[in-house]
Image (cartoon, rainbow, N blue to C red):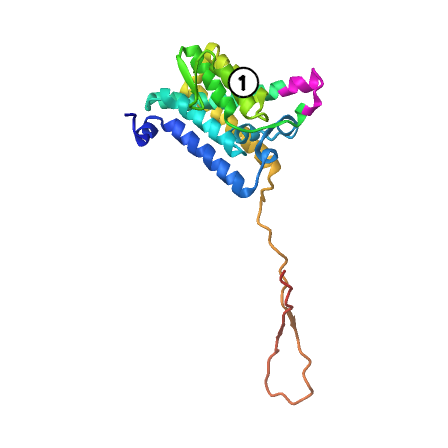
Amino acid sequence: MGTPLHLQILERPVTSILITLCTSVWAWLNHRHLGYQDVGLSHDLVIHNRQFWRIVTSQLSHVDYIHLLFNMTSLWSLGGFEQGGQNSIVVLQQSLWLLVGSGLICLAIYHAAVYFFHKEHYRHVTAVGYSAVIFGWMALLSARGISNFSIFGMVQLPMSLAPFGALVITSVIIPQASFIGHLSGILMGYLMAYVLYGLTVNLWCSLALLALLTAGCVYSLREHISVPTAFHVPNIHLPNFARPTLPDADIESGADVALLSSQQGSHQ
């Protein structure tokens, strides 16, 4: 008899939080009727329009339910090595590095395709989904010597073949899946395993990366969202005080009478 689901969730806190987050983002996007162009990763939108926040939103967003289901199933399968505690913190750190690194590698490949191979359509290719991070984890775990991996809970593959096997299977099942996006995750996973591993498990380096990412997102959002710097005070019409014309009469005592004349404005 297997471990109850609620205990598995407690054993995999980071994985469970990420699945909840991606599912919530998918529900919100569908509720708001938002699509690829609103949140996806695109060469021109990120590099030329400096919408750096798309590096984050693109990877946490899913438009199609099937895409979300496949990715979250794979993420849950990968989360089996997470044992909570200190290991969960490392998983969170490395997930951050995979998210940022795979996004940057994907943009670099798009850039090379546009400027070196004159593939102009890569300017506007838009990618979404957590797939790049998942493929990065497959590559990272294969380099660590993890033995097997279940793809979508259906196919068991040696971990050394899992990144490329999943790449082929995903391309068949979901033809519109981003091959370059998945490949970027694989490249980042191997780069972390053999070159950057020390940085990715260092808490201070990960916090520095998070600070840079946050600063870049805030900077790009400030450029594209109008934020008022001061309250707008509408014109105030002062009442018109006038001295009335009094009839000729014997006045023993009196005072100036002020008439309040106010003009009622229109309300739209």
Position of residue 241 relative to residue 64, above or below, is: below
User: In the drawing, does residue 126 fall left or right of residue 65?
Assistant: right
Apparent side of residue 255 relative to residue 76 in the rendered image (left or right): right
Q: Position of residue 220 (x, y in %)?
A: 58, 32
Main SS, magenta region, reads: helix
Spot occupied by residue 59 in the image (x, y as percentages of width and height): 52, 28
Q: Which residues are magenta?
A: 110-121
Q: Residue at x 43, y 15 (%)?
A: 141
Out of 53 and 179, give the one closest to the viewer. 179
Specify the amino acid type for callout 1. Val
Instruction: Give percent across and percent down for residue 18.
Output: 43, 30
Give the quadrant of residue 77: top left
Q: Can the viewer see residue 64 in this picture?
A: yes
Which residue is at the front of the view, 258 or 195?
195
The residue beneath circle 1 is 168
Asked whether 120 falls inside the magenta stretch, the response is: yes
Q: Quadrant location of the C terminus? A: bottom right
